[in-house]
Amino acid sequence: MARQLRLSLGRSHLASFDDFVRGPSNADAAAAVEAWPAWPGGCLALIGPEGSGKSHLAQAWARRAGAQTLAAAEPDIAAAAGRPVLLEDADRGVPSESLFHLINLAARDGGGLLLTARLRPAAWPSDLPDLRSRLNALTVAEIEPPDDQVLEGVLRRFFRERNIRPPEAVYPYLLARMGRSIPDAEDVVRRLDEAGDEGFRPVTRALARQILADSPEA
């Protein structure tokens, strides 16, 4: 099998809904995000484990909605007035008063608030009773750990971005043995690419077996 010539084409990696790979683990959450601006109270909490794709989905929404992305540690409340806002990692120490104001602003004309987190809002820290009641009432969209359909889709995308076309047998082999997150999929494709380049070898099951045997998970 000939080794494909791969060129760096300077592709844009801006997140979009079109290249968000969907499957049973994330389809409902994606539909909930795309339902904006029909979110109750203008807010949605997007919940999922690390490496499940919630940041991709959130950034795709931010691009479509023209949202302002705020820093969780010190969100700029003035920047949120009258426009949609994305706040990631909302369960990691957002000041309670700031989060309270952002939720209130989201319900006003032109507003909107997408919050991402690993934990459900009921588990987020808060020292304000009024904020606690609002967190408990937030609409939640939950992404589960990636299923095989999603992982195969992202493997194909990562291979395509590197101009690699492995035999079809490589996909079920990897899915049965690799880590179960999107970063794991990206890492295994990168390692296969690098190993193939070093030894002038095509990406095959044999190379995949070698790469996975050298991984800590093995």
Image: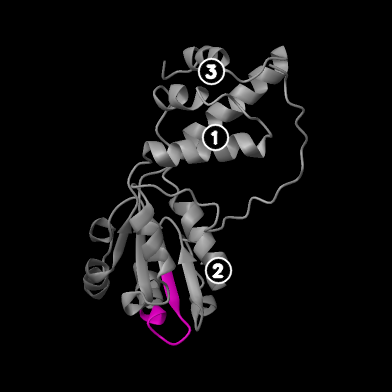
Q: Residues within 10 Å of mark 3 (few under 14, many from 20)?
A: many
Q: Earlier in the sequence, mark 2 or mark 1?
A: 2
Kindly tell me whether residue 90 is visible in this rendering.
no
Q: Residue at the spot x=49%, y=37% of the render?
A: 183
Q: Secondary structure at mark 2?
A: helix
Picture quarter containing residue 112? bottom left
Task: Look at the numbered discs 2 and 3 and tell me whether their residues touch, using CB distance below 8 Å.
Answer: no
Q: Which mark is residue 128?
A: none
Task: Give the residue type that dot 1 points to.
Answer: Glu
Magenta stretch holds residue 6: no
Q: Which residue is mark 2?
A: 64
Q: Which residue is mark 3?
A: 208
**3 on left or right of 165:** right
Look at the picture and state if 53 lies above or below 108.
above
Start and end of the magenta stretch?
104-113
Q: Position of residue 177 (x, y in %)?
A: 41, 22
Q: Secondary structure at mark 1?
A: helix
Quadrant of the drawing holding the N terminus = top right
Q: Which residue is mark 1?
A: 186
